[in-house]
């Protein structure tokens, strides 16, 4: 393949993705779904022509991890913390925990009965399919209005973070007892404290760097700390979300004598530029990840009866376990709209790919993964079209949230 052809393909994919974003804002169809279909189309063309994209398996996981970091960071940079958001955060956390545990337990029971594996292996294989993907939920929910989108942003971010914490607990702990859960809680608390301190240090770095290139080094430090925390089985997504929230709400944190070290006016200008860099980086990484994910699908196995026999019960469990907590916490109209916003995506793929070989269910068809991502994206698209608010994505001002009031 020559250089000109590579440049032609890369630029064409970005422009097609940009047109998908515009099309999505007008038709309510998630752009991620269109990117997956585009990837499937490329795969079909590849099978017909005999031409292949090399090294997909090596590129997909790192690309997905960077995409996940960018999307969670972007979500934090979009959220304003006020006393009005505390009820939203509390309801989102309760919904994320209850939906995750209900869905994971029900799918694990299904796997346990169907495949005859140990219940721990069933839980590990069920967990990726129980997590709401912030990578798809956050962009898609913006058409539902600010209050509902705010709820989904917190809920899906909490779901990603809790999913990784539970995955580490199930995979890397040999024994479970009282002290296991005490150390689990201590891990979360220590991660929160370190995240606040790290966010303060990075904000100070942004304020003090005078070199023209300043945002990329800051993001590189964030990636470095993420990788180091992941290597010791912490949940670095907490750090990413806290850092985004910290930057977007810097005036709530920097007070009194701290103002001597921060020039808030200059820092806020730098944060606006940093936000713009993150938005564009997220767009590019998300584009190539989902196109390559669609391309990596095994089309003959995707249409097998075994995959559909597992996919359909998993899909039903995912929405049944989500509907109950939402209906107990939210007004009927909000619960009905948000029930459909339960896509599986980046974090599902990354955790499923990270299951150790000795815990993986061999009889579980790999194509179920793509079916679940496509199926939940289609359900979300239908739900968003049904419940979209006119001008819902035009968030011009931070509005007080009233969503959790039953």
Image: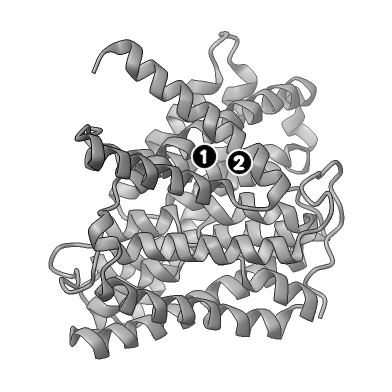
In the image, 70 versus 187, the foreground residue is 70
Q: Secondary structure at mark 1?
A: helix
Instruction: Say left or right for 328 vs 122.
Output: right
Quarter location, residue 108: bottom left
Q: Residue at (38%, 44%) from the top-left corner?
A: 41
Give the residue number, with chain letter if any, for mark 1: 70
Q: Can residue 195 be seen in the rendering of this structure?
A: no
Q: Determine the residue positioned at 59% across, 39% down.
A: 20
Callout 1: few (<14), some (14-19), or many (20+) C-alpha neighbours within 10 Å? many
Question: Is 312 rendered above or below residue 245?
Answer: below
Could you tell me residue 132's position as x and y percent? 51, 64
- C-alpha separation, residue under disc 1 versus residue under disc 2: 6 Å
Q: Disc number at residue 45?
A: none
Q: Are marks 1 and 2 in contact (CB under 8 Å)?
A: yes
Question: Residue at coordinates 62% horizontally, 70% vertically from top-left?
Answer: 340
Whether 371 is drawn above or below 47: the answer is below
The residue singled out by tag 2 in the image is 74
- Residue 310 is situated, as x and y percent measured from the top left of the image, at 32, 77
Q: Position of residue 371 (x, y in %)?
A: 38, 64
């Amino acid at each position: 393949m020559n250089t000109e052809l590579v440049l032609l393909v890369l630029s064409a994919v970005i422009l097609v993705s940009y047109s998908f974003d515009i099309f999505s804002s007008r038709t309510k169809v998630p752009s991620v779904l269109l990117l997956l279909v585009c990837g499937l189309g490329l795969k079909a063309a590849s099978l017909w022509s005999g031409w292949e994209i090399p090294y997909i398996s090596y590129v997909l996981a790192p690309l997905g991890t960077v995409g996940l970091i960018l999307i969670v960071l972007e979500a934090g940079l979009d959220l304003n913390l006020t006393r009005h958001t505390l009820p939203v955060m509390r309801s989102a956390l309760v919904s994320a925990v209850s939906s995750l545990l209900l869905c994971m337990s029900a799918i694990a029971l299904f796997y346990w009965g169907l495949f005859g594996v140990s219940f721990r292996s069933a839980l590990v294989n069920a967990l990726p399919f129980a997590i709401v993907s912030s990578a798809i939920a956050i962009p898609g929910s913006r058409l539902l209005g600010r209050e509902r989108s705010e709820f989904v942003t917190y809920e899906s971010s909490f779901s990603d973070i809790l999913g990784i914490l539970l995955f580490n607990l199930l995979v890397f702990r040999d024994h479970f007892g009282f002290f296991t859960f005490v150390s689990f809680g201590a891990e979360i608390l220590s991660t929160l404290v370190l995240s606040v301190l790290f966010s303060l240090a990075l904000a100070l770095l942004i304020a003090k760097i005078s070199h023209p290139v300043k945002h990329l080094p800051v993001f590189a430090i964030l990636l470095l700390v993420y990788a180091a925390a992941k290597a010791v089985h912490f949940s670095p997504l907490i750090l990413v979300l806290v850092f985004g929230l910290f930057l977007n709400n810097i005036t709530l944190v920097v007070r009194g004598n701290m103002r001597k070290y921060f020039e808030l006016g200059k820092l806020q200008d730098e944060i606006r530029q940093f936000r713009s860099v993150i938005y564009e980086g997220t767009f590019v990484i998300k584009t190539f990840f989902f196109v390559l994910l669609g391309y990596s699908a095994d089309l003959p196995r995707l249409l097998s009866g075994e995959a559909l026999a597992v996919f359909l019960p998993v899909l039903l469990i995912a929405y049944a376990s989500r509907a109950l907590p939402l209906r107990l916490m939210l007004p009927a109209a909000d619960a009905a709209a948000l029930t459909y916003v339960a896509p599986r995506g980046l974090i599902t793929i990354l955790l499923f790919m990270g299951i150790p070989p000795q815990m993986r269910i061999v009889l579980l068809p790999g194509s179920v993964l793509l079916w679940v991502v496509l199926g939940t994206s289609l359900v979300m698209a239908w739900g968003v079209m049904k419940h979209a608010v006119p001008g819902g994505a035009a968030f011009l001002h931070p509005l007080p949230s009233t969503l959790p009031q039953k």
